[in-house]
Image: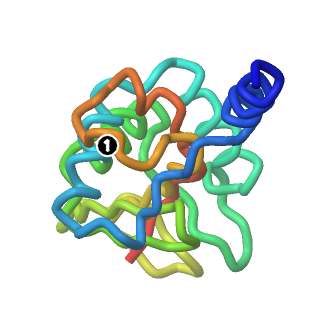
């Protein structure tokens, strides 16, 4: 009997927790998750976002991709505002969500010469356990800020 108990306990410890399923959450809940994350994200989470965004080329003009036209010192505050006060949100790929904030009439960036007035940010909630409260800032420290860019 003790071996069975230990085997069951071991199985529970090695199995990953069920990931937060964004497709099962309503928009209002996703917005609260984003707001909490935006207000509490660690420097490491932000650093990864900036690194991925830079690698994707959204800080420099290039053919066929949107890029920021704002001074670089202004971008972090607007991206944080996008996450904390999203105008719209959408679930995708089961554990991800995008957040959008429109700053119209201010131009944020451009894509192929077309001015863009909004910022979009993608978040992966896969490392956050299903059932986590949307206001649990400590648990949201596991979320990944994937990418941000100017959008329409």
- In-front residue for pair 83/2: 2
**Whole-percent x, y for residue 137 in the image:** 32, 26
**Whole-percent x, y for residue 136 in the image:** 29, 29
Check disc 1 and report the residue beneath it. 78
Residue 107 seen anywhere in this rendered image of the structure: yes
Identify the residue at image location x=58%, y=42%. Answer: 17
- In-front residue for pair 4/50: 4
**Whole-percent x, y for residue 59 in the image:** 62, 49
- In-front residue for pair 57/46: 46
Identify the residue at image location x=58%, y=50%. Answer: 126
Left/right placement of residue 95 relative to residue 63 reads left
Identify the residue at image location x=50%, y=49%. Answer: 125
Left/right placement of residue 27 relative to residue 58 reads left
Task: Say what secondary structure mark 1 lies in.
Answer: helix
Q: Is residue 5 above or below residue 114?
A: above
Q: Residue 76 appears in which quarter of the rendering?
A: top left
Quadrant the N terminus occupies: top right
Q: Is residue 93 above or below residue 108?
A: below
**Whole-percent x, y for residue 31 in the image:** 23, 55
For disc 1, the neighbor class at 10 Å (few under 14, some 14 to 19, many from 20) is some
> Total marks drawn?
1
Quadrant the C terminus occupies: bottom left
């Amino acid at each position: 009997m003790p071996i069975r108990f230990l085997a069951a306990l071991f199985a529970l410890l090695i199995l990953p927790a069920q990931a937060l399923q964004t497709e099962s959450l309503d928009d209002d809940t996703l917005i609260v998750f984003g707001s909490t994350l935006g207000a509490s994200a660690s420097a490491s989470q932000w650093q990864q976002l900036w690194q991925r965004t830079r690698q994707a080329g959204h800080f420099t003009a290039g053919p066929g991709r949107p890029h920021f036209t704002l001074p670089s010192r202004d971008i972090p505050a607007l991206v944080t505002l996008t996450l904390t006060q999203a105008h719209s949100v959408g679930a995708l790929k089961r554990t991800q969500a995008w957040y959008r904030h429109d700053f119209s009439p201010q131009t944020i960036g451009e894509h192929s010469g077309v001015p863009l007035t909004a910022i979009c940010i993608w978040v992966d909630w896969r490392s956050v356990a299903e059932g986590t409260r949307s206001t649990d800032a400590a648990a949201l420290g596991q979320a990944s800020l994937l990418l941000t860019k100017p959008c329409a």
